[in-house]
């Protein structure tokens, strides 16, 4: 009798556990007041710093308190785990509803996983004219539109005014029409800003390259494509022809650009080598903040990341003209994307619209450090910029957008990750000094890229 | 009158067996779900083209054939071998030597043992970050130390020629685990063997060579097997130090890093599974070789030889 009672009791407990486990789900679908959850996966790029996390949580609160049908939640993932976590969520059938902020590079990296938002735009008859044209184009691919533009990160030169003053040099011009500000002029200025431990600059004959304490120029926070996109090659920032079948990474312009970089490191000494970068990385400092770099070429996202609490005066100037007499200033851009396999995609679309709406886009971009992709909020955002980063030439930021690289240096190509690694190995060869001959580096890299493309097209005819 | 005590349904032996199965069930279930299942799944994936997003497509032996023609596969395998050939024996010897020293009867020996073991409990990521600072040519402590002797230290992690040697040096940081196992082995050597050797006039070196070393070969064998598996699975530190790139100039593109890149960066999950199985076969082959060789050099107390 006791035994029987025990068995019935155990069965009852087990059934209760199972039913209660299912119960939440059943109730969730039946309760009319229940909000649909939109999980926003953050970690592909910016957005994981503690202050950004707080700001995103505040943004979520703002949304959730004003919307009855949808609840948003920011899922913060450490940047170094973004790929494994995102793929695990996809393969586990638990795709997040939105992913972002996504750079052009992570859009490319996971290209096949994104939903085409064109039908949503058409269904809502959404007017895209308020967005900057290039920002819309950066999300538009032949077979899909990956997301509404959120922000742009134009690039320009951050320069240390104190170092220019100490060297008795004029600041780089802010005049976008002044063609004397070219890549050769940058080299000259950078060499004069480069100092050894005896205070001699890199143009002096007894300059000691073994004991450099201050460098004139740095562009080490970018990839090979980014570094060479400004040199005016026919395919600009793309290492393939437009049909993606032929590798063109050894174009004369890219070779010229890489030679300029290699000479800058190993002959003219105004650019720090890989060893210098490794030192900064291990110390956890950026190239500009310690005040030992005259000019640092970077993007708008560096405003939020590196322009706080500087011990020197800084300003920004346009990137110089390339040897062809053309100015190209590579650009980064962010958006939010919807994974194809996500549930509640309509709700995700509603949230995407909200995040990029004129009413909220400035707040969102302040979190991530981007220039809002909407023209109508430019004045409002400028006020914020002035408050956050006083004393810099804001015109340089906005005007640089007009000189963006197209095709973009991060845009999708077949086997994006593999080709990026092949090219960046070339950059590493130069920075490490393992191979200083730019022609050889890019010829080898091009052969490797071609092989990857051939294999891709053989498997995907 | 009938007894109210029911005879047990199963015999004692059967009941003991059932209890044994019940006790090992958590591990068995965990093993099947979290190890055997993924292993079998990866074996299946190794014959497919699988990018995680789309369903796997059966392609037979194509991944295995492609692997043979993949230069980076051979390159990464070469780097891993290079690392294993240096780091494995060095780690075994250094940890053995330290264990012998820590087996002496001196004051404060427990403190010394703790000091040497402590680094091995630190997570690999933290170790990598710590050593990145130590190796820093400008702000680190290693190159200024070498400079005291007139040696200009290299760019440890930025020079392709020095990156693997730097990782080998770093690996010595974690020999504490080996030391503890060696210590246990050393303390298990019967003291009467030493006494007998002393009576026979053996010197300290001869006692070490002919008593200590043979008697501890089982633990050397154990550490060798685990060390072999560990070096072929080397990943965390190099992933952290190179941000997953295997640079400078692919000089640290270890096998597992290349496997990881294929899986999570290039989304060639089928190809990565193939790499995993090839690695498994390589490690299994070496392990079997070592096991086979153990008859010649591993001595177990009580074992009869040559009969």
Image: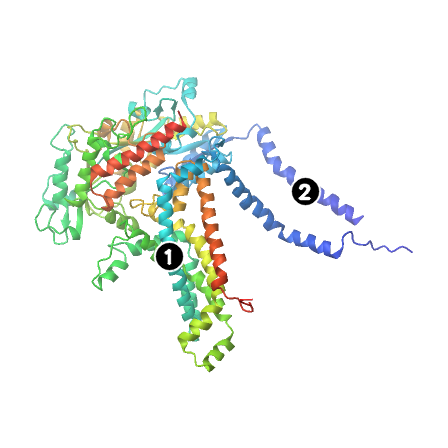
Q: Quadrant of residue A121?
A: top left
Label number found at residue B87: 1
Residue A207 x/y as whole percent: 11, 50
Q: Quadrant of the C terminus of chain B?
A: bottom right
The residue that disc 2 covers is A14
Q: On screen, B132 above or below B209?
A: above
Q: Residue at x 31, y 27 (%)?
A: A373
C-beta proximity under 8 Å, tags 1 and 2: no
Residue B48 x/y as whole percent: 48, 34
Q: Quadrant of residue A15?
A: top right
Label number found at residue A240: none
Q: On screen, A339 above or below B156?
A: above
Q: What chain does mark 1 sit on?
A: B
Residue B107 x/y as whole percent: 42, 75
Q: How is the image coloured?
A: rainbow
Q: Nearer the viewer, mark 1 or mark 2?
A: 1
Q: Quadrant of the N terminus of chain B?
A: bottom right
Q: Residue at x 56, y 69 (%)?
A: B302
Separation (CA) of disc 1 from disc 2: 53 Å
- The one nearer the camera, B160 or A49, is B160
> Callout 2 environment at 10 Å: few (<14), some (14 to 19), or many (20+)?
few
The local secondary structure at tag 1 comes to: helix
Name, please, the residue furthest toward the right: B1
Q: Residue at x 27, y 56 (%)?
A: B140
Q: What chain does mark 2 sit on?
A: A
Residue A397 x/y as whole percent: 23, 32
Residue A370 visible, this orientation: no
- The one nearer the camera, A132 or A362, is A132
Name, please, the residue furthest toward the left: A205
Q: Is residue A374 left or right of residue A315?
A: right
Residue A202 visible, this orientation: yes
Q: Residue at x 70, y 56 (%)?
A: B16
């Amino acid at each position: 009798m006791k035994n029987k009672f025990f068995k019935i009791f155990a069965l009852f407990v087990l059934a209760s556990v199972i039913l209660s486990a299912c119960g939440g789900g059943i109730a969730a679908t039946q309760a009319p007041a229940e909000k649909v959850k939109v999980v926003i996966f953050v970690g592909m790029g910016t957005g994981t710093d503690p202050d950004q996390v707080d700001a995103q949580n505040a943004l979520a609160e703002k949304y959730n308190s004003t919307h009855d049908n949808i609840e948003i939640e920011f899922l913060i993932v450490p940047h170094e785990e973004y790929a494994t976590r995102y793929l695990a969520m996809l393969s586990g059938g638990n795709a997040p509803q939105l992913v972002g902020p996504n750079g052009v590079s992570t859009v490319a990296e996971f290209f096949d996983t994104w939903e085409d938002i064109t039908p949503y735009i058409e269904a809502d008859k959404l007017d895209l004219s308020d967005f900057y044209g290039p920002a819309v184009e950066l999300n538009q691919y032949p077979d899909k539109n990956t997301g509404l533009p959120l922000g742009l990160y134009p690039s320009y030169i951050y320069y240390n005014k104190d170092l220019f003053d100490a060297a008795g040099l004029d600041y780089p011009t802010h005049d976008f029409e002044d063609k004397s500000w070219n890549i050769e002029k940058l080299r000259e200025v950078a060499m004069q800003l480069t100092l050894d431990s005896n205070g001699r600059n890199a143009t002096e004959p007894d300059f000691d390259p073994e004991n450099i304490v201050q460098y004139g120029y740095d562009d080490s926070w970018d990839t090979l494509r980014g570094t060479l996109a400004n040199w005016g090659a026919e395919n600009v920032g793309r290492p393939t022809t437009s049909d993606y079948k032929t590798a063109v990474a050894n174009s004369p312009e890219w070779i010229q650009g890489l030679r300029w970089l290699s000479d800058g490191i190993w002959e003219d000494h105004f650019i720090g080598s890989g060893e210098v970068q490794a030192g900064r990385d291990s110390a956890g400092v950026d190239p500009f903040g310690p005040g030992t770099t005259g000019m640092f070429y970077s993007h708008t996202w560096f405003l939020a990341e590196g322009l706080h609490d500087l011990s020197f005066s800084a300003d920004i100037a346009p990137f110089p003209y390339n040897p062809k007499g053309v100015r190209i200033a590579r650009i980064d851009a962010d958006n939010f994307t919807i994974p194809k396999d996500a549930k509640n995609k309509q709700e995700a679309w509603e949230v995407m619209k909200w995040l990029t709406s004129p009413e909220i886009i400035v707040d969102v971009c302040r979190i991530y450090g981007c220039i809002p992709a909407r023209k109508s909020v430019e004045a409002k955002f400028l006020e914020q910029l002035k408050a956050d980063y006083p004393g810099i030439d804001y015109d340089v930021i906005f005007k640089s957008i007009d000189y963006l690289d197209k095709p973009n240096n991060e845009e999708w190509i077949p086997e994006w990750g593999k080709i990026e690694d092949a090219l960046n190995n070339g950059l590493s060869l130069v920075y490490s000094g393992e191979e200083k001959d730019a022609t050889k580096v890019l010829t080898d890299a091009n052969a490797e890229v071609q092989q990857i493309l051939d294999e891709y097209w053989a498997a995907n005819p | 009158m009938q007894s109210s005590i029911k005879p047990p349904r199963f015999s004692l032996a059967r009941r003991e067996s059932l209890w044994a199965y019940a006790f090992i069930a958590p591990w068995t279930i965990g093993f099947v779900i979290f190890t055997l299942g993924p292993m079998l799944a990866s074996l299946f994936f190794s014959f497919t083209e699988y990018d995680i997003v789309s369903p796997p497509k059966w392609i037979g032996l194509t991944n295995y054939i492609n692997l043979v023609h993949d230069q980076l596969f051979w390159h990464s395998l070469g780097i891993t071998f290079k690392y294993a050939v240096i780091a494995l024996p060095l780690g075994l010897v250094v940890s053995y030597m330290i264990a012998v020293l820590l087996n002496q009867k001196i004051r404060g020996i427990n403190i010394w043992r703790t000091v040497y073991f402590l680094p091995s409990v630190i997570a690999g990521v933290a170790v990598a970050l710590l050593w990145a600072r130590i190796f820093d040519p400008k702000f680190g402590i290693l190159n200024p130390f070498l400079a005291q002797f007139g040696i200009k230290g290299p760019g440890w992690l930025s020079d392709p020629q020095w990156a693997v040697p730097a990782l080998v040096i770093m690996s010595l940081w974690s020999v504490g685990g080996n030391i503890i196992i060696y210590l246990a082995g050393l303390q298990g050597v019967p003291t009467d063997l030493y006494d007998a050797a002393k009576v026979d006039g053996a010197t300290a070196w001869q006692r070490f060579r002919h008593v200590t070393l043979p008697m501890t070969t089982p633990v050397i064998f154990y550490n060798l097997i685990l060390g072999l598996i560990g070096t072929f699975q080397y990943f965390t530190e190099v992933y952290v130090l190179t941000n997953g790139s295997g640079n400078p100039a692919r000089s640290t593109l270890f096998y597992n890093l290349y496997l990881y890149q294929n899986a999570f960066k290039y989304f060639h999950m089928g190809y990565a599974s193939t790499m995993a199985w090839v690695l498994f076969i390589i490690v299994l082959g070496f392990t079997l070789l070592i096991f086979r060789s153990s008859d010649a050099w591993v001595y177990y107390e009580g074992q009869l030889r040559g009969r």
